[in-house]
Image: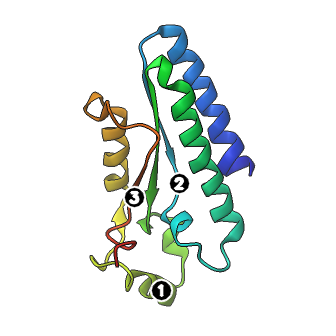
Amino acid sequence: MIINVKAPIRLSQLVARDLIKRGTGGAIVNVSTVLTQIAPACQIPYTMTKAAMDNATMAMAVELAKHKIRVNSVLPGLVDTPHASQYPPEIVQMVLKRYPRGQRAGADEIADTIVYLLSDRASNITGTKITTDGGMLAN
């Protein structure tokens, strides 16, 4: 709860307070997980906290809209990171079978989505969850 809910909410509050003081508007992007959309077994604490963050993101989007601050979540699937490289290979292969692309995303692909949501090009996107799962949910 501290890492996945309290810390990002507190950070969002600090950023929002600064953006409100500047009067410039802006954007906040939280990172969640596609697992909140499929409810996998043995992941209850993790997915529960990430789902709570997704809900808080939507509430913040409504609350901060009057200040021209957009708030969104990015929901990555399996990403090629040092942490993910610790998963047993058989688990990774099992998970990747659900991905139409058959591969995990690179961290840069997730970062590009976040950069887009922070940019003025996403000026009409707020209170939403952008899934970056390589088509896993569609499969």
Mark 2 / mark 1, whichever is N-terminal: 2
| Image disc number at residue 89 | 1
Tell me whether the residue at label 2 lies in contact with that at label 1, contact meaning CB atoms closer than 8 angstroms.
no
Residue type at numbered disc 2: Ser
Residue 135 at x, y percent in the picture: 32, 70
Q: Secondary structure at mark 2?
A: loop
The residue lying toward the viewer, choosing from 82 and 41, is 41
Residue type at numbered disc 1: Pro
Is the residue marked by circle 2 packed among few (<14), some (14-19), or many (20+) residues within 10 Å? many
Q: Secondary structure at mark 3?
A: strand
Is the residue marked by circle 1 packed among few (<14), some (14-19), or many (20+) residues within 10 Å? few
| Image disc number at residue 32 | 2
Residue 19 at x, y percent in the picture: 50, 17
Screen quadrant of the C terminus: bottom left
Residue type at numbered disc 3: Thr
- Decide: is 139 above or below 79: below
Going by the picture, which residue comes out furthest to the top?
22
Mark 1 / mark 3, whichever is N-terminal: 1
Q: Which residue is at 43% across, 20% downward?
A: 68
Q: Which residue is at 37% across, 53% downward?
A: 110
Q: Which residue is at 63% across, 27% downward?
A: 13
Q: Which tag is nearer the camera, tag 2 or tag 1?
A: 2
40 left or right of 139? right
Mark 2 / mark 3, whichever is N-terminal: 2
- Decide: is 137 above or below 28: below
Residue 56 found in image quarter? top right
Q: What is the distance, in whole Å, between disc 2 and disc 3 at their CAs?
A: 9 Å
Mark 3 lies on residue: 131
Going by the picture, which residue comes out furthest to the right?
2
49 left or right of 23? right
| Image disc number at residue 61 | none
Q: Secondary structure at mark 1?
A: helix
